[in-house]
Amino acid sequence: MDESERIARRESQLRNILAHIVVEPDLRRVLDLILKEGAKFLNMNAGGIILHDEANPNNYSYYAAMGIPIPYTTRIITEESGLISHVISERKLVMLQDFTPDTPFGKMWCGLGFKVVIAAPILYRDKLIGLIHLSSTDPGRRMDSFEKESFQVYAEYAGIAIVIAQSFEELRKHRARLEEEVAVRTAELRTANEKLNETMVQLKRSNAELEQFAYVASHDLQEPLRMVISYLQLLERHFQNAFDDKAKMFMNYAVDGGRRMQALISDLLFYSRVGRTEKPMTNVDVEIVMKNVLQNLGKTIRDKNVEIECGPMPKITGNEMRIAQLFQNLIANGIKFCEEGKTPKIKVAAERREKAWLFSVSDNGIGIDPKYFNKIFQVFQRLHSREEYPGTGIGLSVCQKIVELHGGEIRVDSGPGRGSTFSFTIADK
């Protein structure tokens, strides 16, 4: 098996593991699964996950362990010398094999009978969450450089799963507090019959909104956007007298753009949720949808001097928010995957077909090798490194599912260096 095949197999295994883990809402269960699946993935028989202690910023504690004696897993880890504290402070992976008690960091692990130990920081958006370490007592176990790299990648996937689980846990706590508050208010309002019916209607509406919020708020795009809007509004309130009319106008544009994006994100779901709780299909004016999409992408279009050509768009039956997401993903990809120094050119067209509309989004970007046509629509599949082109690799998977939700099909026509054309159909309803 050559290097590319090993990488492809590793990515497939990691995607399957992550998909299995993220559906579990309980944080402790998620941590146990991360540890057990990681040990299985790298053929280890012991390990632990150490997370940041919110009560004391300088301390870390074991939240999951296997094959480690209890006295070691119940103590609080501080900035004392040792492998774990070293990895936490340096934020770098460390691997020990063929080591002795005299090897740096080797004394404790030799005493526990381990022959190989590997530890890596768990990071999410450059924030240190904790650490994961795996080890083996097998005298013949050795790790090569590919396994070392695989463990580093696994630690990154673990960070995503942990953040999602922590979000769910916070939402459960928030929901419990809200339910308690609702119960108290309901008990107080029982004495006022005239207000009771009105209050119950309000509570039902509030609960429905909270259900929707809890369902969407775990999406990690919402928190950074909320922070941006909050700080923009703080600037607007505290420094409005220092702004001239033009600056105030720009600030209003920024806040308004943030709110539009927040409304869009609030109605978006991850790939696994598309189609579960969809709004009813309605009449959608794609001309208006395209105007909103181009407005959402306005800053990127201006910054990169993108040339957009959009032909006449029809009215269709569909989910307006999903259709907007579909076009926005395809246009954003066309802009992103353009050679440096080259003016991105995007062409959007629509053509009537029997019982369906055929839409196309074309670009003059770097293109796609035909052998990857099927791969690009798979979840978390990437053809380029994150350093070259940022993103999660889920955009086209979402596009495919949205198209299928509307009874259509999506395909791509492309080649290296000659741009790409994504065509999809939206069936008549």
Image (cartoon, rainbow, N blue to C red):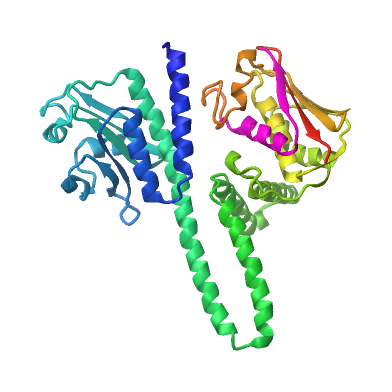
Can residue 247 be found in the magenta stretch? no
Location of residue 423 in the rendering, given as x and y in whole percent from the top left corner: 76, 25
- Asked where in the image residue 40 lies, by quadrant, the reply is top left
Q: Which residues are magenta?
A: 393-415
Location of residue 131 in the rendering, given as x and y in whole percent from the top left corner: 32, 39
Can residue 406 be found in the magenta stretch? yes
Image quadrant holding the N terminus, namely top left
Q: Is residue 162 above or below residue 209?
A: above
Q: Is residue 111 visible?
A: yes
Number of marks: 0
- Asked where in the image residue 80 lies, by quadrant, the reply is top left
Image quadrant holding the C terminus, namely top right
Q: Is residue 43 left or right of residue 358?
A: left
Q: Is residue 9 left or right of residue 71?
A: right
Q: Is residue 154 above or below residue 266?
A: above
Q: Is residue 201 left or right of residue 355?
A: left
Q: Is residue 176 left or right of residue 140?
A: right
Residue drawn at (57%, 44%) of the image: 221
Q: 111 or 389, which is in the foreground?
A: 111
Residue drawn at (76%, 37%) of the image: 294
Location of residue 394 in the rendering, given as x and y in whole percent from the top left corner: 59, 33
Q: Is residue 73 above or below residue 19?
A: below
Residue drawn at (67%, 33%) of the image: 399
Location of residue 312 in the rendering, given as x and y in whole percent from the top left corner: 89, 32
Q: 3 or 333, which is in the foreground?
A: 3
Residue drawn at (62%, 71%) of the image: 203
Q: Is residue 92 visible?
A: no
